């Protein structure tokens, strides 16, 4: 592995850490509906610029280039770049093609796909994108043909939706993530923000 690729791996790891810290602080704190997403968007815009340059040079930065760990971090960064619909739509066919050739995992593709569906106001297909219910637990945004969701998930070797939700809520509890007060107000605000950013509308739960 040449030094340039090693440098990319190190940078992507740092970008991922920065984004995770910012996202946790701004989206899961008890007052997260009041912060206007500004800091998170700042990191998104930085990452979009950085990743665009990498994609321009290498195409989709998959496993063969970066190794599994850095390639997964890249996919997660893209999934969180919801401030730029055009960028996410650009990346979707790239990661899909990489998935077909074994250069990306199916889980990465379906999470990006579901994120786009939710922000376009459409039911998601695989149930990967979650929100808080009125009972304070994580539940999926609306899923198309939910009765067959596990069949679709299995095509990409994903665990059942039930198990996925069980693990997500366990992790939320371990990290002390709780449903914020006025969550409905936040989702309303997020929907308006998404529309302003160029999405159709946010999917209903």
Image (cartoon, rainbow, N blue to C red):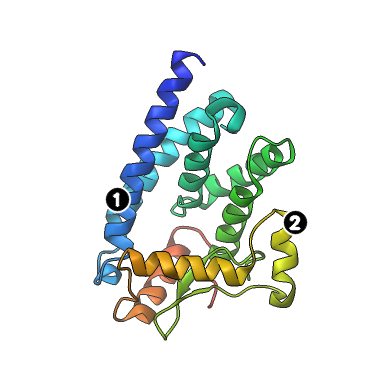
| Kind of element beneath mark 1 | helix
Task: Residue 92: give x, y in percent of width and height.
Answer: 62, 46
Height in image: 30 above or below 158?
below
Task: Residue 156: give x, y in percent of width and height.
Answer: 70, 53
Asked whether the beta carbons under mark 2 and mark 1 sit within 8 Å of each other, the answer is no
For the residue carrying disc 2, how many other residues have a C-alpha within 10 Å: few (<14), some (14-19), or many (20+)? few
Q: CA distance from mark 2 to mark 1?
A: 32 Å
172 vs 38, left or right, is: right
33 vs 193, left or right, is: left
Q: Earlier in the sequence, mark 2 or mark 1?
A: 1
Task: Residue 188: give x, y in percent of width and height.
Answer: 40, 76
What is the quadrant of residue 60 in the picture? top right
Height in image: 94 above or below 82?
above
Task: Residue 84: give x, y in percent of width and height.
Answer: 47, 50
Residue lying farthest top?
A: 2
Q: Which residue is mark 1?
A: 21
The mark total stands at 2
User: Which residue occupies 60% across, 67% down?
Assistant: 127
Q: Is residue 58 visible?
A: yes
| Kind of element beneath mark 2 | helix
Q: Which residue is mark 2?
A: 155
Residue lying farthest bottom?
A: 135
User: Which residue occupies 50% across, 58% down?
Assistant: 198
Q: Is residue 122 visible?
A: no
What is the quadrant of residue 24 in the picture? bottom left
Height in image: 189 above or below 61?
below
């Amino acid at each position: 592995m040449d030094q340039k690729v090693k440098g990319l791996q190190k940078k992507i790891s740092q970008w991922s850490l920065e984004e995770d810290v910012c996202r946790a602080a701004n989206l899961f704190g008890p007052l997260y509906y009041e912060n206007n997403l500004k800091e998170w968007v700042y990191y998104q815009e930085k990452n979009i610029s950085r990743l665009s340059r990498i994609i321009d040079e290498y195409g989709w930065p998959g496993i063969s280039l970066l190794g599994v760990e850095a390639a997964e971090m890249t996919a997660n960064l893209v999934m969180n770049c919801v401030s730029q619909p055009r960028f996410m739509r650009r990346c979707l066919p790239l990661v899909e093609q990489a998935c077909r050739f074994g250069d990306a995992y199916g889980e990465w593709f379906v999470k990006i796909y579901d994120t786009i569906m939710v922000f376009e106001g459409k039911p998601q297909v695989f149930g990967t994108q979650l929100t808080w219910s009125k009972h304070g637990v994580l539940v999926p945004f609306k899923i198309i043909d939910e009765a067959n969701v596990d069949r679709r998930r299995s095509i990409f070797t994903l665990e059942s939706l039930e198990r996925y939700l069980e693990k997500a809520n366990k992790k939320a509890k371990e990290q002390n993530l709780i449903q914020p007060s006025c969550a409905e107000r936040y989702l309303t605000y997020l929907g308006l923000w998404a529309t302003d950013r160029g999405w159709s509308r946010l999917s209903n739960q």
